[in-house]
Image (cartoon, rainbow, N blue to C red):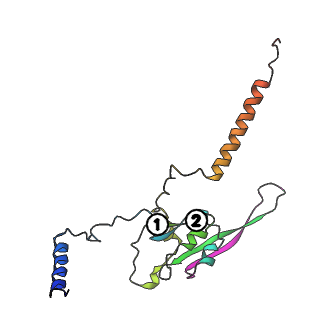
Amino acid sequence: MAPIPGSGLAKGLAVTLRTMTKKTVTEQYPDAQPDLPPRTRGVIGLFEENCTVCMLCARECPDWCIYIDSHKETVPAAAPGGRERSRNVLDRFAIDFSLCMYCGICIEVCPFDALFWSPEFEYAETDIRDLTHERDKLREWMWTVPAPPALDPGAEEPKEIATARKTAEKLAAAQAEQAPSADPQGEES
């Protein structure tokens, strides 16, 4: 059976008319801020107090966009006769967001929870050289990081907490057994 001439045009116009009658969902961005999902990847925030300058984030970054400078500082012995310790002190922590591809590898490999995703996304610059943000700016973004989501009520208990709870229960049971078995003096049999 041959198609009726112009049926494709009629179907296309019908779709266009249906779309024209629906309410638009366009948000005017500068005037109305978008509702972002809770786990939005915006920029990377730095919690400087947790950074030990281990350099894992810079080494694992596929784009080599993280710049870290540090120096060693000698810490005096805590007790007399102890030995002095040396520790790394962070001098510079910068991320070049013109190179960053927002993969999140640096955040995942950080063993000390010093890097976090912030939902901030308004950091445009007029010059590409200004997209390298230093630690003071990264620290400002840290305070916009949302709190982690609550644990699922149906999820199993984390192993660390379960082990600690079981150990505490065993200790309490052992103490409860010892308390009644101790014979108070002066009782007659």
Residue 54 placement (x, y as % from top left): 66, 71
Residue named by callout 2: 114
16 lies left or right of 117: left
User: Which quadrant holds residue 169?
Assistant: top right
Residue 31 in percent (x, y) is at: 26, 69
Left or right: 122, with 179 as reference point: left
What residue span does the magenta drawing correspond to?
61-80
Q: Which mark is residue 144?
A: none
Q: Nearer the viewer, residue 65 or 86?
A: 65
> SS at mark 1?
strand
Q: Are marks 2 and 1 in contact (CB under 8 Å)?
A: no
Cα separation, mark 2 vs mark 1, equals 12 Å
The quadrant of the image that shows the C terminus is top right
Q: Amino acid at mark 1?
A: Ser
Whether residue 173 is in magenta: the answer is no
* Residue wearing tag 1: 118
- Residues 48 and 108: in front is 108
* Quadrant of the image containing the N terminus: bottom left
Looking at the image, which residue is at 68% across and 48% down?
Answer: 163
Residue 14 x/y as whole percent? 16, 77
Q: What type is the residue that disc 2 sits on?
A: Ala
Looking at this view, name the residue that lies furthest to the top.
188
Q: Position of residue 33 (x, y in %)?
A: 32, 66
**Secondary structure state at the residue bearing disc 2:** loop
At x 47%, y 82%, the residue is 98
Please tell me whether residue 75 belongs to the stretch shown in magenta.
Answer: yes
Query: Residue at coordinates 42% horizontally, 68% vertically from top-left?
Result: 120
User: Label 1: how many residues lie within 10 Å, few (<14), some (14-19) or many (20+)?
Assistant: many
